[in-house]
Image (cartoon, rainbow, N blue to C red):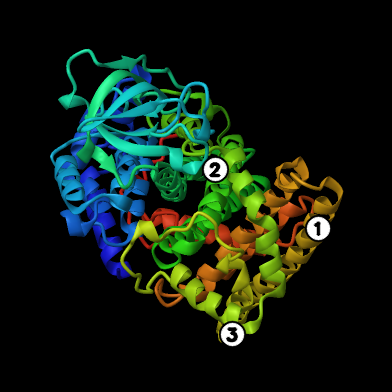
Amino acid sequence: MAVEHLVGLAERLEDHLGDPHDDAGGRMSFRKVLRHDEQEDYPHELASLLQAWGIHEYCLPERWGGKAGDVEVGFNLVRLVARRDPTTATALMITNVAFMPTWTAGTDPQGTATVEAIKRGTRMSWGLSERHHGSDVLANDMRAEPVPGGYRLTGEKYLIGNATIADVVSVQARTAERRGPGAWSILNLDKRQCPAGTVTPLPNERLHGLRALDMSGIRLDGVFVPEQNLVGAEGQGLELALKGAQVARTVIAAIALGAVDTALRVTLDFAEGREIFGRKVADIPYSRRQLAECFADLLLADAVSAGAVRGLQCNPAQASVYSSVVKYFIPTLLERTAGQLSVVLGARFYLRDHPHFGIFQKMLRDLSAVSFVDGNTVVNLKNIAAQLEGLLTVARDAEDPVRAEAAERAEAMYGLDAELPEWRPERQLLISRGRDDALLALPAALARLRDRARGHRDADQREWYLRAADLGDRLAKELYRLDAEAARIAREAGRGHTGTAEQFRLAEQYCVLHAGAAALHLAAWSGDALGGAPDGAVLLLQMERVWRLLYPAETVTDAAVVDRAMEVLRGLHEEGRLFSHWPIRVRSSHDRVMA
């Protein structure tokens, strides 16, 4: 899908929602959002506003009556909702995630009926987690007993979003007593078709963030579900759950990106309007660097998510790697970024009712949920750790043809104007077989970036791009260090070494290397689509942020780089642009309310 189409659609949504700082005219203003949050009141009004616009249709497949083409369209629309309210964005995403098993393995009649129902307002819930098992889905207790014409469901699902307000719950349940992954299936439980009193809602849990969300559960005691509500084949439940998790872990980054966009925007408003010690806060060198670094963090996360979201379509065989990288790296990075911004914002961070800055504390609270929803940090690092030896071996020994194939796929993942194939989630693999094209194709991206840099007419930009590429070379060499460390751990720890704390630390570092490669790929392959590659100073600052995650004491940028990054940040804000590589215009008041 052309960049222009995505941008135009996103801007129409922004115009529909209005200025979030406009209490009178903004349809989805921060004041309304905070009222729902303070009262812990599910945002029915805001969800209806978005449904009336038709946002949900861009997350439903065209072949069954939706409008979803490329995943990045729905991703960026949800991101724009999240910059106003992560709670409403999460509520929308829960239905999308609960629909994923049907999208992956449903029949045409199931798919058409479900899409039509969602378009008419049906809400769904994803019934995966249970009270005593959490992320250990192989230990789940809910049973689906085969009976004539269908199944009888017995058990409990707990801490699942939309559980009480949902009309349909997509439930993972045990359909066989044997051990192994083929013991579970997925059924769509339509609560509206169940006899009164047979589906018992569990109490809504009060949350630290996402306060207005329905986070509750259901208890079932022999509830009949017709056979036609089975999704996919009997015994396919775990596979569908894991493939759905890959999608959820990738697209949930939209919540984090949207929240930190707002946090950075209101902090910049403060820094530009507040004077202390005779200077604007934004002109104090320390604060200036803090803002520039946070901007670089956000664009780094933007690059990682862009490649992963596009990879769901053009590189589904590697979804197990980049979905876990996204789910570990982006929340971890952006929670730190938001904390850094709170230092710049100072006392106004605590003012819950301030007309301009009250939204910051909500964004900070809501952001923390992203790290554990749909697979927590440990689960995602475990997935990387289990595949790490294979990934490092291939990255070390890959021959030229393998790297050339990886470069072709990487260009499609990170070239935002590259045409994508139809999204077929059933093609996603649960194991990557040692491939991660972001790192395999890093030499090709560095070569292209250097070629572009040498042709740049601005000497400073040329130098910054080349310095960023040099850091890319250093990151590539870190793969060999990780490979040697992984071999040592395997020798010393023996069987079970993939579960050791040392192996998990290597998995963390691998995610950092993937993130740095993503930023370089986006700069190398998306320059034409974006009217010019990302600014050289901003790219160099991103690479410094990556490098300092490995070596915290090493700084490679100077004041000139920070000044240029701040110039870019200010320009985007004054132009009313999303803090992203995507050139999306957003509705954002420029009133500087500092009192």
- In the image, 178: left or right of 74? right
Q: Earlier in the sequence, mark 3 or mark 1?
A: 3
Tag 3 secondary structure: helix
Could you say which is closer to the camera, residue 358 or residue 500? 500
- The residue singled out by tag 1 in the image is 487
Is residue 533 placed above or below 93 in the rendered structure?
Answer: below
Quarter of the picture holding the C terminus: top left
Distance between the alpha carbons at the discs numbered 2 and 3: 33 Å
Could you say which disc has been placed on residue 451 in the image?
3
Could you say which disc has been placed on residue 331 in the image?
2
Circle 1 packing at 10 Å, graded few (<14), some (14-19), many (20+), is few
- In the image, 586: left or right of 378? left
Which residue is at 19% across, 46% downward?
Answer: 110
Could you say which is closer to the camera, residue 362 or residue 413? 413
Q: Amino acid at mark 2?
A: Pro
Which residue is at 64% across, 47% downward?
Answer: 284
Q: Earlier in the sequence, mark 2 or mark 3?
A: 2
Is residue 346 placed above or below 565 in the rendered structure?
Answer: above
Q: Amino acid at mark 3?
A: Asp
Q: Quadrant of residue 421?
A: bottom left
Could you say which is closer to the camera, residue 53 or residue 436? 436
Which residue is at 13% across, 39% downward?
Answer: 120
